[in-house]
């Protein structure tokens, strides 16, 4: 009787799972720490990076947001007065909103 050849399935290195877990946990913690707090009046708003600063200013001004500070041409710190201000900023072209204190250390001017 002839012995059948078994093909062993290649295994990933042991460090690969640990690295994937480290990256996933870092991403989750970073995402939670830069979220806008409920009821925040001042938020950092990211517009598409190919927009000029003038276009980002016009989009923020179109929803009556008061510009507090600029960090990058497409990242503005604005004050919103009405509760639906974030939704109106998204409709004006903003991709997402961030907690301005979380990004303040990255973009000192």
Image (spheres, helix red, strand yellow):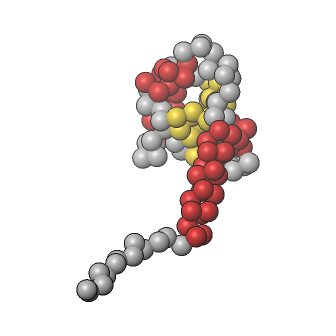
Residue 69 visible here: no
Left or right: 68 with respect to 96? right
Query: As displayed, is residue 93 above or below residue 63?
Result: below
Residue positioned most to the bottom: 2
Left or right: 74 with respect to 32? left
Instruction: Tell me where residue 15 sits by quadrant.
Output: bottom right
Residue positioned most to the left: 1
Instruction: Tell me where residue 55 sits by quadrant.
Output: top left
Residue positioned most to the front: 1
For the N terminus, give its image quadrant.
bottom left
Query: As displayed, is residue 8 above or below residue 37?
Result: below
Residue 91 visible here: yes
Q: Position of residue 83 (x, y in %)?
A: 59, 13
Residue drawn at point x = 48 percent, y = 32 percent = 94
How many numbered marks appear? 0
Residue nearer the viewer, 40 or 54? 40
Residue drawn at point x = 69 percent, y = 50 percent = 106
Q: Position of residue 49 (x, y in %)?
A: 46, 46
Q: Position of residue 95 (x, y in %)?
A: 47, 35
Residue nearer the viewer, 58 or 74? 74
Residue drawn at point x = 45 percent, y = 41 percent = 48
Q: Position of residue 89 (x, y in %)?
A: 50, 25
């Amino acid at each position: 009787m002839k012995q059948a050849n078994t093909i062993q399935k290649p295994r990933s290195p042991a460090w690969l799972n640990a690295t994937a877990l480290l990256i996933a946990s870092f991403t989750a913690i970073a995402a939670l720490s830069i979220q806008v707090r409920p009821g925040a009046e001042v938020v950092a708003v990211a517009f598409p990076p190919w927009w000029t600063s003038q276009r980002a200013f016009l989009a923020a001004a179109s929803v009556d947001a008061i510009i507090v500070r600029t960090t990058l041409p497409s990242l503005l710190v604005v004050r919103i007065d009405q509760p639906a201000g974030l939704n109106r900023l998204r409709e004006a072209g903003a991709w997402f909103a961030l907690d301005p204190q979380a990004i303040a250390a990255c973009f000192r001017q």
